[in-house]
Amino acid sequence: MKKRHLLGALALGTAAMLTLAGCAGGGEPEGGSGDGGSKDLTIGVFNGWPEGEAASYVWKLVLEDQGYNVDLQYADAGPVFAGVADGSYDLALDGWLPFTHAAYFEEFGDDIVDLGAWNEDAKLTIAVNADAPIDSLTELADNADLFGSRLIGIEPGAGLTAATQDNTIPTYGLEGFDFVTSSTPAMLAELQTKLEAGENVAVTLWRPHWAYDAFAIKDLEDPEETLGAAESIHTIASSDFEAEFPEVHGWLSGFTMDSDVLFSLENVMYNTDEDVSDYTEIVRQWMSENQEWVDGLTS
């Protein structure tokens, strides 16, 4: 999954590619939170994974309000896992289980700590307009004419595209559909156009994604799990994280963020046709509008 900036300039692969540099600070405490340890934290952020970036921004600002110095460092998933394992990063907020990152959890399991899942609704989907007259993929073939026999996909090389082509279409008898693949921006643009015209539309999508907050859409049930089962998103930390940051360890161990909250945050961050490289002010505004939820993160 890639970072989205809609509409027009949004692109699945246009996540900020910031330089991988810097390590978790081990300096002297600055300011008081009662930890008695380092006040400098580095959060590893996966390139192109918006849910992790969104959660990381929230925690960066929350922790800074608590007197910590927080640095976000971007890298691909493998290097982030390795960085957490060797202590270059203190934590990361985007480990997917039981499938996507299982190999990394196994490879680095002795040197990282799983602080638990903060979201348990990550999955690939086929979505339709919320008022569509069907609720399951088992009904889609028999109602092909209502959707113009058209299923709108994303990039041809995406894993979601392969799963749809190889599993979903043959399993549910959708061979008569025109499965259109081009790009995520094109899919989202057509989704918006169809919804604004009051027409039925079917698209390949995934959770978490801001489209669920921006548009009136619903997922079609996939009883055969052709797109895979739901996954959970976990926080991972270095092996000495609890000893170094006991207060933060406690907060993060109890951290949860349901999909509706996450969708609303992603919507304000990524549903824009502007190229944004620093989301601080956007996230700060969102936090002020969701203050009760934010306050609960450290209570």
Image (tube, rainbow, N blue to C red):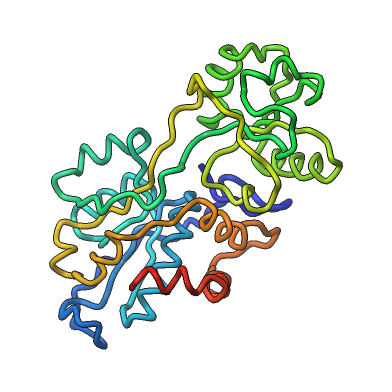
Query: Residue lying furthest bottom in this view?
Result: 31
Which residue shows up at 44% across the image and 60% down it?
A: 55
Q: Is residue 155 visible?
A: no
Left/right placement of residue 76 relative to residue 260 reads: left
Q: x, y percentage for residue 81?
A: 28, 49
Residue in the foreground of this view, choosing between 98 and 184: 98
Up the image or down, 104 lies above or below 14; here it is above
Which residue shows up at 64% across the image and 39% down it?
A: 218
Which residue shows up at 74% across the image and 38% down it?
A: 131
Q: Is residue 81 visible?
A: yes
**Image quadrant of residue 265?**
bottom right
Residue in the foreground of this view, choosing between 92 and 24: 92
Left/right placement of residue 125 relative to residue 51 reads: right
Q: Quadrant of the C terminus?
A: bottom left
Number of marks present in the image shown? 0
Q: x, y percentage for residue 211?
A: 64, 48
**Image quadrant of residue 27?**
bottom left
Residue in the foreground of this view, choosing between 87 and 118: 118
Q: x, y percentage for residue 29?
A: 20, 83
Which residue shows up at 13% across the image and 67% down it?
A: 243
Up the image or down, 158 lies above or below 140; here it is below
Up the image or down, 277 lies above or below 107; here it is below
Q: x, y percentage for residue 158?
A: 54, 32
